[in-house]
Image (cartoon, rainbow, N blue to C red):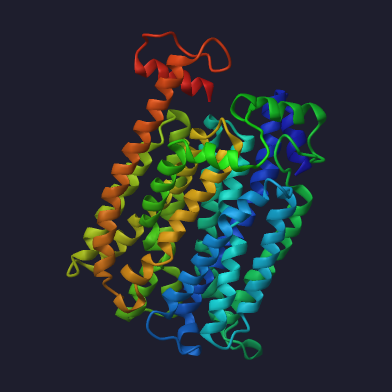
């Protein structure tokens, strides 16, 4: 690691480039590993369910969906408190501590004897895991400019998808090599191994995570680099106020909280193909596939999700246009839902449809990068908006799978596919709304600002020039 930094320094990087190399390495290494284990420990229930847990715990009806719903309820409960705790407790302490909590709970899941024990464990695990997603996006928005944020958000999001991808591959390998070892079923070994992976990464976070620029004491940053880190975002992080009721009034008095929360609350439901492991349930229900195939085949969707996320985010950083990614995502999921609705279509077409649905995850990194950019001038609003986006999406997730994707609907999920088409249409409408409100704010700011930090254009310029000026300001 140090050798890599020296190599970069040897190429005579400028101070800012050297700073980016360091924060890319140390922030992204921990955030990505943390989110990798977050999704690894979250998706393992889906893999365990189709690998013997259902039969061993005598699960019936929609109990699988109830496990996910209780996890989501815990996630909702912990969302805002976890985000506010980052304003009180240093992130380098809080985030690894929460990771240790959910790692221990993952170990506990390997010992359960009834589905009701899983209900309780997953609820508490949801509270702990809710610290990661919005918390990391808050940290990324504190260190990176808008033109740098999309790719970093995509790398972070892809690390979670890699956890899902690895979980399926890991479960297949565990089932093949460890099933029955020491009298434990293969799905129980999955939780043990996941816990073993999680805890050392949490310890790594305690030592290297740098907090935010204004408070960082990271050993690998010089005094001049700490000053530069704060100065780089000084124009977009100036509203440092103590938490108070005025904070709530300020946030609720603007359009940002409402529109951004609505955007991810709706668009996030396009991920239902993957979050409910519909492909795995479909393969198990139609029969003819081994446990290893049921674990491995859905990995194609995750691989396409990672590819879509990285490609789209790279494009958005260059173009500074976020909305086209949501159009791409909604279009792909609409096509997927139609292909699955036409039940007599060939099996190969259904494989294609499920894999294409991986495009839904491209909107996750883009939507949060967009919100970071919209709220860049108010760090408290940014933290609350990011947490609220994730919270409201999970409020819907708490009941959405039970109603529209119950395990008893496998393999067709007829209601769910109709709902998916409706969600995609609603995503397009809300995307346009956020796009319109953001540009209206840019025009208003350009019209009233004078020469200063925002470098606002003179009155009478075209709207497009005002928008370009806003991009320069970011």
Q: Is residue 468 left or right of residue 235?
A: left
Point out residue 42 in the picture as x, y percentages from the top left corner.
54, 66
Q: Is residue 230 left or right of residue 408?
A: right
Which one is nearer the viewer's eye here, 115 or 353? 115
Q: Is residue 219 left or right of residue 27?
A: right
Which one is nearer the viewer's eye here, 197 or 228? 228
Q: Is residue 60 above or below residue 414?
A: below
Tell me where residue 432 sits by quadrant.
top left
Is residue 105 among the parts visible in the rendering? yes
Point out residue 294 in the picture as x, y percentages from the top left corner.
41, 74
Point out residue 109 in the picture as x, y percentages from the top left corner.
60, 78
Which one is nearer the viewer's eye here, 381 or 186? 381
Tell me where residue 459 sits by quadrant.
top left
Q: Is residue 241 left or right of residue 445?
A: right
Q: Is residue 400 above or below residue 356?
A: below
The residue lying at 44 percent from left, 55 percent from top is 393
The residue lying at 51 percent from left, 44 percent from top is 385
Q: Is residue 183 above or below residue 140?
A: below
Image quarter hosting the N terminus: top right
The residue lying at 40 percent from left, 21 percent from top is 443
Is residue 197 among the parts visible in the rendering? no
């Amino acid at each position: 690691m140090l050798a890599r930094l020296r190599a970069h320094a040897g190429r005579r990087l400028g101070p800012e480039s050297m700073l980016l190399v360091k924060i890319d390495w140390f922030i992204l290494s921990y955030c990505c590993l943390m989110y990798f284990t977050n999704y690894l420990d979250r998706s393992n229930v889906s893999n365990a369910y189709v690998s013997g847990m259902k039969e061993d715990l005598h699960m019936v009806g929609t109990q699988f969906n109830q496990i996910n719903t209780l996890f989501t309820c815990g996630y909702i409960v912990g969302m805002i408190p976890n985000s506010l705790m980052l304003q009180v407790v240093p992130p380098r302490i809080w985030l690894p501590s929460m990771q240790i909590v959910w790692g221990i709970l993952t170990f506990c899941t390997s010992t359960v004897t009834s589905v009701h024990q899983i209900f309780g464990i997953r609820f508490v695990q949801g509270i702990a895991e809710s610290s990661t997603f919005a918390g990391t996006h808050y940290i990324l928005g504190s260190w990176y400019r808008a033109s740098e944020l999309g790719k970093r958000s995509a790398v972070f999001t892809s690390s979670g998808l890699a956890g899902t991808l690895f979980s399926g591959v890991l479960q297949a390998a565990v089932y093949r090599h460890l099933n029955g070892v020491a009298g434990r079923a293969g799905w129980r070994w999955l939780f043990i191994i996941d816990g073993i992976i999680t805890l050392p990464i949490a310890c790594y976070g305690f030592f290297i995570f740098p907090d935010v620029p204004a408070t960082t004491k990271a050993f690998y940053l010089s005094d001049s680099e700490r000053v530069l880190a704060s100065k780089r975002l000084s124009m977009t992080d100036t509203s440092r106020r103590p938490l108070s009721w005025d904070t709530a009034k300020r946030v609720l008095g603007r359009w940002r909280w409402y529109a951004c929360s609505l955007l991810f609350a709706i668009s996030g439901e396009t991920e239902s193909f993957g979050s409910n492991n519909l492909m795995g349930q479909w393969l198990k229900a139609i029969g003819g596939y081994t446990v290893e195939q049921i674990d491995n085949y859905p990995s194609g969707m995750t691989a396409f999700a990672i590819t879509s996320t990285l490609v789209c985010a790279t494009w958005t950083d260059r173009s500074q246009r976020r909305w086209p990614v949501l159009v791409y995502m909604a279009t792909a999921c609409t096509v997927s839902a139609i292909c699955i609705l036409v039940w007599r279509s060939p099996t190969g077409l259904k494989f294609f449809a499920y894999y294409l649905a991986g495009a839904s995850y491209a909107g996750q990194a883009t939507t949060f990068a967009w919100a970071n950019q919209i709220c860049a001038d108010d760090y408290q609003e940014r933290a609350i908006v990011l947490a609220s986006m994730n919270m409201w999406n999970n409020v819907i997730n708490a009941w959405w799978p039970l109603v529209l994707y119950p395990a008893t609907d496998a393999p067709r999920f007829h209601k769910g596919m109709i709902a998916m088409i409706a969600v995609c249409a609603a995503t397009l409408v809300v995307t346009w709304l956020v796009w319109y409100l953001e540009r209206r704010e840019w025009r208003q700011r350009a019209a009233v600002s004078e020469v200063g930090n925002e470098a606002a254009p003179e009155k009478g310029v075209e709207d497009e020039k005002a928008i370009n000026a806003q991009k320069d300001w970011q």
